[in-house]
Structures are given as structure tokens and as C-alpha cells.
């Protein structure tokens, strides 16, 4: 039996293609409640809140051209909104660029499933709250291969705030997605 036979078993048991793809991305069936994640190297001891004193808003390892592109994108989105009263739909990319620049997150290649990047040994999922969103919360797949969730909030004045939540501090439940509310967590302004 190979390491990937569980994917065939999932297909035979009636799992959807999306569920099978999620399982392939994280290397195990996240919908199997009998699995002990510590067998796969995921220890809840590693899911701790980051010490913000270790993080700086001036990450020395970031390409200055990337910072310039990010600033230009934010400026252009702001100018576009002031001219048209419409928002450019680039929120997710702005949130991920913000995480890369301000936290030093090393982003994965495009379309990588399970998480958006790494910070040290932690896999990071990045979710963005836009100014046009009605509620200050995000939804993230429980099956994702991440240890920490970075929530980036972009305000109406195009200022950015962020917070990192350890996976173990997310609400428990059985649904496909978990909701993380901005209000229940301390914010870090940037």
C-alpha cells in the first residue's frame, strides 16, 4: 500500500473531488476523525501565538521593489475609489503582500492548497477583510494545512490592521469552515 492510497479510498467512500484535493494537499484525510495529527508532525504544542516583539514592520529581507509595488497598488486602488466610488477587487492579493512585507512571510507558489506561506516553521493562512465587507470576520477551511491564521483588515481609508491567531485558538466545530471574528482578537495596527 502506497502513502497515497488513502486518496483512492476516499474516492471509493464517496468524498467529493474538492475534499480529495484538500486531502492530497495536506497528505492525509482531514475529514477522518480517527486520525491523530501528531502522527503527521502536527503538534498542538507548536500552535502558539506569535510574540509580536519579534515582528517588525520594517522587515529587512523584503525586496524594496515589492514594497514599491505594494504601495503603488494601494495608492491606485485608493485613487480609483475616489474617482469612481468603486473598489478594485484586489483585496486578497493586498492582504498577502501585506503579510509578506510586514511579517516576512515566505509565500508559496500560486495555487498551492492548504496555506498561503510560511513564517519560520509555521504554515500561515492569510485572509483579508475588505472595507466593503459587511461583517468583520473571515471563513477558513478547517482542512487547511496551517498553524496560524493571519487576518488583514483594510479600512475605508486604505489603512491596514492585522492579527495572527493560533489555529488552536479558533472556534471548535465540525463544519467545513471555521469563522474567525476580528472583534474577539487583539489587533496590530500597521
Image (cartoon, rainbow, N blue to C red):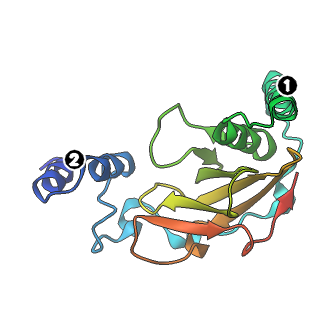
Q: Which residue is drawn at 67% across and 56% down?
A: 150
Q: In this view, does 67 lie to the left or right of 135?
A: right
Q: In this view, does 88 lie above or below 159?
A: above
Farthest top residue?
65
Which of the labelled discs sits on residue 4, or is there none? Answer: 2
Which of the labelled discs sits on residue 152, or is there none? Answer: none
The secondary structure type at the circle numbered 1 is helix
Q: Mark 1 points at which residue?
A: 68
Q: Residue at x 40, y 64 (%)?
A: 176
Q: Is residue 16 above or below residue 186?
A: above
**Horizontal and vertical percent position of residue 28:** 31, 56
The secondary structure type at the circle numbered 2 is loop
Residue 46 in view of the camera:
no
Q: Is residue 167 left or right of residue 23?
A: right
**Horizontal and vertical percent position of residue 82:** 87, 34
Q: Is residue 11 left or right of residue 117?
A: left
Badge 1 local density, few (<14 within 10 Å), some, or many (20+)? few
- Of badges 1 and 2, the one in the foreground is 1
Image quadrant in which you'd find residue 62: top right
Q: Is residue 16 left or right of residue 133?
A: left
Q: How far apart are marks 1 and 2 (CA)?
A: 43 Å
Amino acid at each position: 500500500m502506497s502513502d497515497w492510497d488513502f486518496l483512492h479510498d476516499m474516492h471509493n467512500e464517496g468524498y467529493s473531488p474538492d475534499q480529495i484535493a484538500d486531502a492530497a494537499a495536506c497528505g492525509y484525510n482531514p475529514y477522518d476523525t480517527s486520525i491523530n495529527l501528531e502522527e503527521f508532525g502536527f503538534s498542538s504544542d507548536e500552535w502558539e501565538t506569535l510574540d509580536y516583539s519579534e515582528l517588525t514592520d520594517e522587515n529587512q529581507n523584503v525586496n524594496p521593489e515589492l514594497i514599491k509595488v505594494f504601495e503603488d497598488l494601494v495608492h491606485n486602488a485608493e485613487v480609483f475609489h475616489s474617482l469612481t466610488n468603486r473598489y478594485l477587487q484586489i483585496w486578497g492579493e493586498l492582504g498577502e503582500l501585506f503579510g509578506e512585507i510586514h511579517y516576512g512571510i515566505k509565500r508559496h507558489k500560486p495555487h498551492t492548497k492548504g496555506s498561503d506561506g510560511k513564517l519560520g516553521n509555521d504554515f500561515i493562512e492569510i485572509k483579508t477583510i475588505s472595507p466593503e465587507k459587511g461583517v468583520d470576520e473571515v471563513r477558513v477551511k478547517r482542512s487547511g494545512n496551517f498553524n496560524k491564521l493571519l487576518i488583514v483588515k483594510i479600512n475605508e481609508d486604505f489603512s491596514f490592521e492585522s492579527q495572527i491567531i493560533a489555529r488552536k485558538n479558533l472556534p471548535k466545530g465540525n463544519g467545513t469552515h471555521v469563522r474567525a471574528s476580528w472583534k474577539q482578537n487583539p489587533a496590530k495596527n500597521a
